[in-house]
Image (spheres, coloured by chain):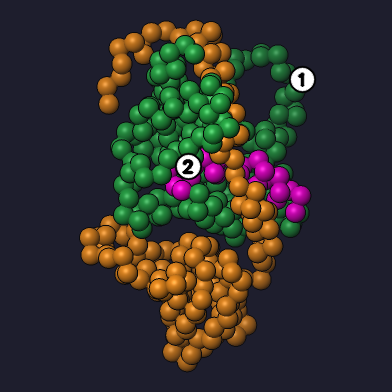
């Protein structure tokens, strides 16, 4: 990615050893395969927010989002022996979560987003309405309201990116059916629109 | 969708830093206001208990509720037909939504033959016996993730988890 001679020569052999496992997911999956509860808990802790964000980005209500969350991790248990690239378990989870979201939307006869700008049936909010105690926080209220005025595509993308820890662009692409190359530019455009909505608060 | 003319302008490190700062604010909003429910995390953590080594996986290969050609003819009460396939066994399951919201599963093992089934669902486990022609029924299955564990003689097949 970086140019040659990029100050990392001493780390080269180490980098070789952990190639594809910069986050430690490969190791965690390996331990979970043996039934290591602590490793599994860490996988859930590390990826849970991202899976939840995928469900919210598809505008699922809390009950449906919990179903997607649960079935996504159950499927990972079922497939944990056979997933091809344990270091990219986040991408696997994003793909599975999106697939389950689309099944729920199709079953309910709701519009299914197809990657780009299609309008989703906005029956469920992207974020729950702010509670009274949060409305008192002017900045949070402004962010919440500003987000809701963005295009559907921007709302969905930003909601996925709002997961903590932040998902990789590969995971975002899988979560939304977006080409990876379009994520960075779209993110920039959406944040620009949001800044405009916020009017420099 | 047409790009705004002003998006073509060159962005510098300051813009990137401002974008990252705004993104961090949004992330804090979601973490504070729409966190993963603790019950969902607890359920996901306990999911590892379903890990099994002795069974072959039957993958979901068919779901009538998402097949576009059927979308127009489906009504709210139409049962969903799910198909799970393993190497030597296919499990077909019709999901019927009951008036009380629970699910009734009507199934068929292919090739036809007797077997014992455990339906694992959110409310626990329901057992069912498949008759000589491979038919089985299970009642009072909770809505949500479901998996069937099928024992046929010496072999055990488990279906993938599926929302019903």
The percent coordinates of residue A190 (x first, y second) are: 41, 23
Above or below for A154 versus B55: above
Residue at 75%, 54% (x, y): give it.
A37
Residue at numbered disc 1: A10
Most common secondary structure along the magenta stretch: helix
Note the chain letter of the green one: A
Residue B110 occupies which quadrant of the picture? bottom left
- As helix, strand or loop, the secondary structure at mark 2 comes to helix
Q: Distance between the residues labelled 2 and 1?
A: 43 Å
State left or right for residue B90 relative to residue B80.
right
The percent coordinates of residue A78 (x first, y second) are: 60, 60
Residue at numbered disc 2: A56
Above or below for B121 versus A100: below
Query: Residue A97 shows which numbered tag?
Result: none
Residue at 54%, 8% (x, y): give it.
B13
Q: What stretch is highlighted in magenta?
A: A37-61
Image hue for chain B: orange
Residue B116 occupies which quadrant of the picture? bottom right
């Amino acid at each position: 990615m970086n140019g040659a001679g990029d100050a990392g020569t001493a780390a080269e052999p180490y980098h070789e050893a952990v190639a594809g496992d910069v986050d430690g997911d490969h190791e965690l999956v390996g331990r979970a395969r043996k039934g290591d509860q602590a490793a599994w808990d860490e996988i859930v802790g590390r990826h849970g927010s991202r899976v939840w964000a995928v469900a919210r980005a598809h505008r699922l209500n809390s009950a449906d989002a919990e179903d997607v969350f649960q079935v996504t991790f159950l499927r990972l248990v079922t497939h944990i022996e056979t997933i091809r690239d344990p270091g990219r378990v986040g991408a696997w989870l994003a793909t599975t979560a999106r697939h389950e979201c689309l099944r729920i939307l199709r079953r309910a006869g709701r519009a299914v987003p197809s990657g780009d700008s299609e309008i989703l049936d906005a029956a469920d909010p992207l974020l729950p309405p702010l509670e009274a105690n949060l409305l008192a926080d002017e900045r949070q209220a402004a962010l919440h309201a500003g987000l809701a005025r963005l295009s559907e595509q921007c709302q969905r993308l930003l909601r996925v990116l709002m997961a903590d820890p932040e998902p990789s662009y590969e995971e975002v692409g899988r979560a939304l059916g977006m080409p990876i190359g379009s994520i960075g530019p779209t993110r920039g455009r959406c944040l620009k629109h949001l800044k405009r909505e916020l009017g420099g608060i | 969708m047409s790009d705004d003319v002003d998006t073509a302008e060159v962005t510098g490190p300051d813009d990137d830093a401002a974008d990252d700062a705004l993104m961090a604010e949004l992330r804090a909003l979601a973490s504070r206001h729409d966190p993963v429910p603790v019950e969902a995390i607890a359920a996901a953590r306990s999911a590892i208990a379903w890990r099994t080594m002795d069974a072959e996986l039957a993958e979901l290969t068919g779901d009538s509720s998402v097949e576009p050609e059927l979308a127009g003819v489906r009504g709210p009460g139409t049962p969903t037909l799910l198909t799970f396939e393993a190497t030597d066994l296919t499990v077909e399951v019709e999901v019927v939504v009951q008036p009380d919201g629970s699910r009734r599963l009507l199934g068929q093992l292919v090739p036809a033959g007797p077997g014992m089934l455990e339906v694992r669902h959110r409310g626990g486990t329901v057992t069912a016996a498949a008759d000589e022609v491979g038919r089985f029924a299970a009642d009072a299955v909770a809505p949500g993730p479901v998996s069937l564990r099928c024992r046929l003689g010496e072999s055990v097949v488990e279906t993938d988890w599926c929302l019903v």
